[in-house]
Image: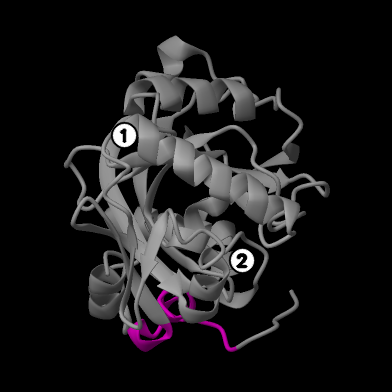
Amino acid sequence: MSTNRQPGFLRYIDDLNQWNPADFRKFYIDGKQAGYIKHFQCDLLAQWPGYFAITKDRVELLATADSVESRSQILAEVVNQLAEQSVIRQPIGESYPVIAQEGEEILATIDRVAAGFFGIKTFGQHLNGYVNSVDGLKLWIARRDASRVHFPNKLDNIVAGGLPSELSLKENLRKECHEEADIPAHMADKATPVGSVSYCRDNGMGLKQDKLYCYDLELPEDFVPRNTDGEVAEFLLLPVDDVLQLILETDQFKLNCNLVFIDFFIRHGIINQDHPEYSELVSGLRK
């Protein structure tokens, strides 16, 4: 089993929480902080003086954008032009909500590809599909397709996806379960919400402020997942101890999925209070 770095679980929490506030300016919409923008990215937004007020400390969407629709239209125009300039990828037509705090009203919507550029809070759903087999507890693992833009060929949760603005948690989980693993709605509805993990990471081109809602779903022994959207190359059913060792000793998983699995291990007593990293892991999963 190849090892690229020092083994351990805390390294993932450390990797996913690397950022320096001094490298960013706060981004405001309607007087509320909606994100963070890197200093050099702020210079790019100076192309639109009619849309943004930029100082050394902050960027603010101008007050003339006085509704969710008008703000969203302005951000869409900016995102399209940033894509034409090859600053970000081409929009994919999946809108994320822009909010100041979880549970508050939506200030605007923005295409998913620009979430990091503006450093907005984003949300996703990750599902642990497990089997209580005669041989012990096992986890279904997905291998991402080689064509994926991010983390090609890496291992992943059986179901994982972002939460767009137009769908509820239940609707989106059903959609992702169908697309990624062909899990029917009546089975997806049995998934147990088990909390969330979160992190904040400077990826060089922006800030990822992510919260992942986590779910456990016990699957029948005779169920075999099947991908329907071309994003998964294969599925593997592995003993839980094998998954733990892969995460502990290798870098084979998509980075943020490690947090979801570590949370699963803690909740199921596989990583317990006797583990030397236990307390730091428990607090670090929800920074």
In the image, the segment drawn in magenta is 6-23
Q: Quadrant of residue 54?
A: bottom left
Q: Name which residue lies at 27% across and 70% down.
A: 287
Which residue is disc 1 drawn over?
68
Q: Residues within 10 Å of mark 1 (few under 14, many from 20)?
A: some
Where is residue 6, by image quadrant? bottom right
Query: Left or right of 84: which side holds 245?
Result: left
Query: What residue does disc 2 label?
Result: 246
The front one of 95 and 40 is: 40
Q: Look at label 1 and name its amino acid.
A: Val
Q: Residue at x 40, y 25 (%)?
A: 166
Give the percent coordinates (x, y) of residue 251.
Answer: 65, 71
Find out whether residue 13 is within the magenta segment.
Answer: yes
Q: Dot 2: what SS?
A: helix
Specify few, some or many for label 2: CA neighbours under 10 Å numbering under 14, 14-19, or 20 or more: some
In this view, the residue farthest toward the top is 186
Residue at the image position 74 percent from the left and 51 percent from the top: 84
Residue 232: horizontal and vertical position, in percent?
Answer: 72, 38
Left or right: 46, with 2 as reference point: left
Residue at the extreme right of the image, as rendered: 146
Question: Looking at the image, is 253 positioned above or below residue 124?
Answer: below
Going by the numbered disc 2, the residue's amino acid type is Leu
